[in-house]
Amino acid sequence: MTQTPENKAAWLSASGVTPLEIGPAPYTSPGPHQIVVKNSVLGINSVDWAKQMLGETLLGYIRYPFILGEDVAGTVVEVGEGVERFHVDDRVVAAAAAISTNISPEGGFQVYTVIREWLATPIPDSITFEQASVIPLAIFTASCGLFDTSYLGLDLPTVPARQSSDKRTVIITGGSSAVGSTAIQLAVAAGYEVVSTASPKNFDYVKKLGAAHVFDYKNDTVIDDISAAVKGVHLAGGYSIGDGSIDLLAAVLSKHQGPSVHKFIALAGGKSGDGSIDPSIQVKFILLGPDAAGPDSVVSNIYKGYLPDALANGQFVPAPEALVVGKGLEKIQEAFGIHMQGVSAKKIVVSL
C-alpha cells in the first residue's frame, strides 16, 4: 500500500457518553495473521448500545476512547505476515474482536478495521455485503455456546451436515433472532434435531432454517409441548435467548424422559423469571473473552473449517434479513435507537 488511507470512526469517547463521536481514527496496518478490511456494511448488536448506556457496569475493562462494533462485511485492502487464506480485494465477512481484546483498531465502527484472519470468511458472489453483515457476532455467540466444551460441547458442524445414528436434540429458544437463526443452522449441520420457540408469525421462517419443531413461547402449554416433542431422545441441553427462556428450558430439562439429558443451559441473553429453577440445572452465561477470539477457538474452527463451504453451497444462509437503516458512520447512533425498540426476524445494519 503506497499511501496510508484516511480512516474515520464512530468513537465512544467516554463512559456513558451519547452520541458516538464521529472523527478521525488512525489507520493501523495488520500484524502477523491479520488483515485490514475496508468496511462496506456494519451490523448493530445489543452489546453496542448497552455498553454506551450502562457504562462501567458492562465490559468494565474497556479503555476510552473506544471503537465498538462486531459485524463487518467489506473488502480486504492489506494482509499481514503469514496470511494465506486472503488476498487484497477479497470480499469477506468478519467478526471484529475489539470487545474481546480491548483494542480499538479491531473495532467495527470505522472505515478500516484490523481483523484476525481466523475470524473472517470469504463471501461468495451470490451473497451481498448487506446479507453477509448479519453473520459475525451471531456466529461468535452461537459457536461458543453450542460447541465450546465450557458450554454445551456439541459435535462440530460439517459440510455436508453430520449424520448421527442416535437421535440427539437440542432446544434453542428465540429462533427468529440473529443468534437463534444462526444457532439453529449450526446445530442441524452438527447432526442435532432442533426444537425452537418463536412467535407464530415466524414459525415458517424458523422451520425453514432447519428446526424440526417450533412452539409459541407465550403459550401456556409450551413446557408440556416441548417436553412431549423431545420425549425419548438424547437431550443435549438448552441454548437460551430471550426473557423467560431460562425457566422454560430448566423445566423441560428437569422433567426429561429419555435415554440421556445434559442439564446445561448456555445463556446468550434474557432474564430469568422468579429464579426458582431446579438446582441440578447448570446455567452459564456465554462470555466472549480473549480466549473465545483465539486462533484455536471453536469460533476459529467455524470461520475457517465450516463457513467457507457452507456459504458457498447454500447449506448456511445469512439470516435474518438485513434491514439497512442508513448510510454512513453518522447513522450508527440512530441505528442504536431502532435496535433498542426491537425488531422481529430482521437484523439492523448500516452501510458505508
Image (cartoon, helix red, strand yellow):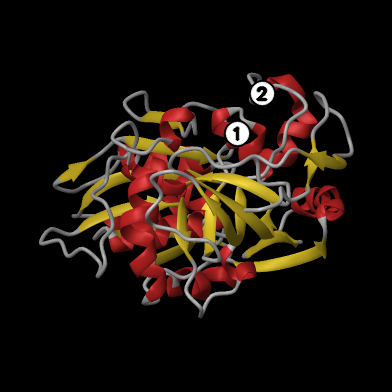
Locate residue 341 relative to residue 268 in the image: left or right: right
Q: Position of residue 223 (x, y in %)?
A: 42, 50
User: Gap between marks 1 and 2, in whole Å?
Assistant: 8 Å
| Residue 14 spot, x, y in % from top left | 82, 25
Q: Is residue 301 above or below residue 269?
A: below
Q: Nearer the viewer, residue 336 or 351?
A: 351
Q: Earlier in the sequence, mark 1 or mark 2?
A: 2
Seen at 37% across and 39% down, the residue is 295
Is mark 1 in CB contact (under 8 Å) with mark 2? yes
Location of residue 187 (image quadrant): bottom left
Farthest residue toward the front?
2
Residue under label 2, please give it. Answer: 62
Q: Residue at x 81, y 52 (%)?
A: 329
Q: Nearer the viewer, residue 75 or 251?
A: 75
* Residue 52 picture quarter: top right
Q: Secondary structure at mark 2?
A: loop
- Residue 278 shows up from this direction: yes
SS for dot 1: helix
Query: What residue did someone put label 1 on?
Result: 99
Inspect the image, locate mark 2, and give the three-letter code of the amino acid beneath it: Ile
Crowdedness near tag 2: few (<14), some (14–19) or many (≥20) residues, C-alpha within 10 Å = many
Say few, some or many: other residues with alpha carbon within 10 Å of mark 1 (under 14 / 14 to 19 / 20 or more): many
With 14 as the anchor, is 323 left or right in this view?
Answer: left
Look at the picture and state if 217 lies above or below 285: below
Quarter of the image with the C terminus is bottom right
Q: Is residue 229 visible?
A: no
Q: From this viewpoint, which residue is outermost toward the bottom? A: 126
Q: Residue 149, image x and y in percent? A: 28, 35
